[in-house]
Image: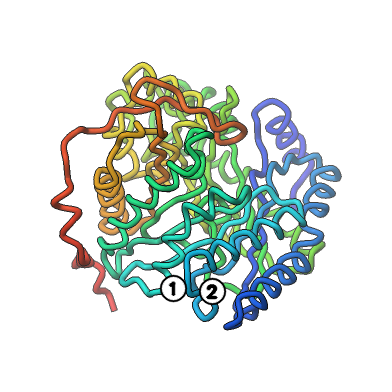
Amino acid sequence: MININEVIETNQMIEKENLDVRTITLGISLLDCVSDNLDVLCDNIYRRITSTAKNLVKTGKDIEREYAIPIVNKRISVTPIALIGASACRTTDDYVQIAKTLDRAAKEVGVNFLGGFSALPAKGMTRSEELLIRSIPKALAETERVCASVNLGSTKTGINMDAVKLMGEIIKETAHLTATQDSIGCAKLVVLCNAPDDNPFMAGAFHGVTETDDVINVGVSGPGVINHAIQSVKGRPFGELCDTIKKTAFKVTRLGQLVAQEASRRLGIPYGIVDLSLAPTPAVGDSIAEILESMGLEMVGAPGTTAALALLNDAVKKGGIMASSYVGGLSGAFIPVSEDHGMISSAVKGCLTLEKLEAMTCVCSVGLDMIAVPGKTSAATISGIIADEMAIGMINQKTTAVRIIPVEGKDEGQTAEFGGLLGSGPIMRVNPYSCEDFIARGGRIPAPVHSFKN
């Protein structure tokens, strides 16, 4: 039970420290929608989503009003569409038709994003997966709420470098088709290594085949709360700093579990996990960079940044797992550039570089996130950046991801504007030297030796 003191403390966090439930994400299995007729398949998908999620947004708003807890987003994730469309889809346009169906269903039920236009070619790529991947640029250009993701590797299987090469080309094409909006299509596309089945955060959310028919997953975020707590132990030893973060993460996770259980009860859908990920927004006071600077860094990107982020990520996880038996998804600290005003400031001043961000991804929750780069960046270079990040995830047995945006028509030093939670960001410098011959090799980078634990 949550006692009155916790209620008072939680109200303080909400009113003054930007605490919120970032998303209630309803995972929906589409396996029972499968048909070899595309029109029938699309009808099945539309009916399944609109019937299952018809009360999702209303329920979220009711909980928000009754408990005075901000719930920023209500979202849906579905079974990876490359699995669902395999029997019916013969062309890329067939997959675009499914994407439009998903977008129409998302609009009907009122969610802001729907994830799961996804493929999982971690070891090998089926014909269906290749078709879906090649349809992504057009699908994202012609829809508003659909998000796409591709899992390119895992600790158990290695890295599918054929898919890595292809995704560099797909990201470039997506940027081109959405060039009039600063290539925003790429902000709805993420590639991953070791993608989890229960992640509620976009753009990487999908409803894994290990999940039940329907499930409620909740993502909680409280960078401002963590930052406020850290400021109360300024100059104190690291042990005290870690304990403070853990205690605060515990309280935040308890809030997420309350919302998840209440949404589950009202919708009659099982509760899955709480994802305690410190996800920033462009608002002042809601920044991961500010947390790291409160620990004693002059600016994020300075020496010590990776160590500070490692401490933060670990302490957040330790606090979260004490609060709930079902902490999952990603759970830790996100470091998106365009969505974090502190990261933006550091990048503009040259303190935070792409190379430093890559080092930070060794210890954060995800990877290179919302990174705007010059539009002239080649597909091979993008594939090289992806390969580096996939290798970090594979070797370290963790989820890593890349959401990179080659903004067509813009160069280093300019700014890309995406709007809303996606924010805006500086176009960052990319190493100009080529990796084209390396990427052209094709095949698969083998799994590391520590993957053989059977």
Q: Earlier in the sequence, mark 2 or mark 1?
A: 2
Q: Is residue 229 visible?
A: no
Q: Is residue 374 left or right of residue 50?
A: left
Q: Is residue 180 left or right of residue 73?
A: left
- Up/down of 447 relative to 376, above or below: below
**Foreground: 375 or 444?**
375
Give the amino acid type for the residue marked by disc 1 in the picture.
Ser
The answer to the question of whether label 2 and label 1 lie on touching residues, with beta carbons closer than 8 A, is: yes
- Up/down of 56 relative to 19, above or below: below
Residue found at x 47% / y 50%: 189
Q: Dot 2 lies on which element?
A: loop
> How far is mark 2 from mark 1, CA to CA?
7 Å
Where is the N terminus found, in terms of image quarters? Answer: bottom right
Residue found at x 52% / y 67%: 80
Task: Identify the image quadrant of residue 372.
Answer: top left
- Up/down of 262 relative to 227, above or below: below
Residue found at x 45% / y 65%: 119
Q: What sort of colour scheme is used for the picture?
A: rainbow
Where is the C terminus found, in terms of image quarters? Answer: bottom left
Residue 325, image x, y percentages: 58, 62
Q: Which residue is mark 1?
A: 128
Residue 297, image x, y percentages: 37, 21
Q: Dot 1 lies on which element?
A: helix
Give the amino acid type for the residue marked by disc 2 in the picture.
Gly
Task: Identify the image quadrant of residue 34.
Answer: bottom right
Q: Which residue is mark 2?
A: 85
Crowdedness near tag 2: few (<14), some (14–19) or many (≥20) residues, C-alpha within 10 Å: many
